[in-house]
Amino acid sequence: RLNVQDVNLSGDLLDFIEFEPTGIIQIDMEVSNTSDDDINFYPDQATITTNTGEQLEADLWFSDHIGGEYLGAVNKSGSVYYLLENSNPEDIDTIRITMSAPHTLEDWEDVGEAVDFEVSIN
């Protein structure tokens, strides 16, 4: 699930992030390791780009921790948040989501493919 909306932050929270965001993008993710092998995967560190030309990294302070070790056949889910810096949320029509491939714990060899897809809003 993906949600783009206005955001109004104030006080200490605004001081903490050091800029006034123009909006927020929330991506709800559900991730499964379908093998019995232990892997590392970091969907909560996905990079996104918008049709308005912004490239954003996940705000790990606001986001749920769903990255790291997946020990065998397990599932993790949560919300990952991106703070818009320069775009009006109403102008966003598409979001491209990219993330590195999962890899083995021991030697960091890829065990799948990198993720790269685009989502249309509306």
Image: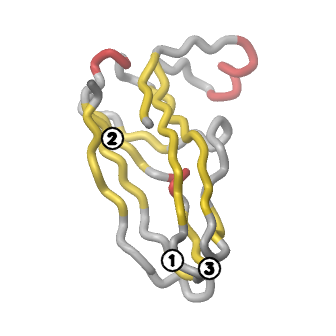
**What numbered label is drawn on residue 38?**
3
For the point 45% across and 19% down, the residue is 5
Secondary structure of the residue carrying tag 3 is loop
* Callout 3 amino acid: Asp
Residue 84 horizontal/vertical position (percent):
44, 27
Number of numbered discs on residues: 3
Q: Which of 34 and 45 is in front in this view?
A: 34
Secondary structure of the residue carrying tag 1 is strand
Secondary structure of the residue carrying tag 2 is strand
Residue 113 horizontal/vertical position (percent):
35, 71
Residue behind mark 2 = 49
Residue 21 vertical placement versus 110 (above, below): above
Residue 89 horizontal/vertical position (percent):
37, 19
Q: Nearer the viewer, residue 72 or 69?
A: 72
Look at the image and tell me in which quarter the C terminus lies: top left
**What numbered label is drawn on residue 103?**
1
* Callout 1 amino acid: His
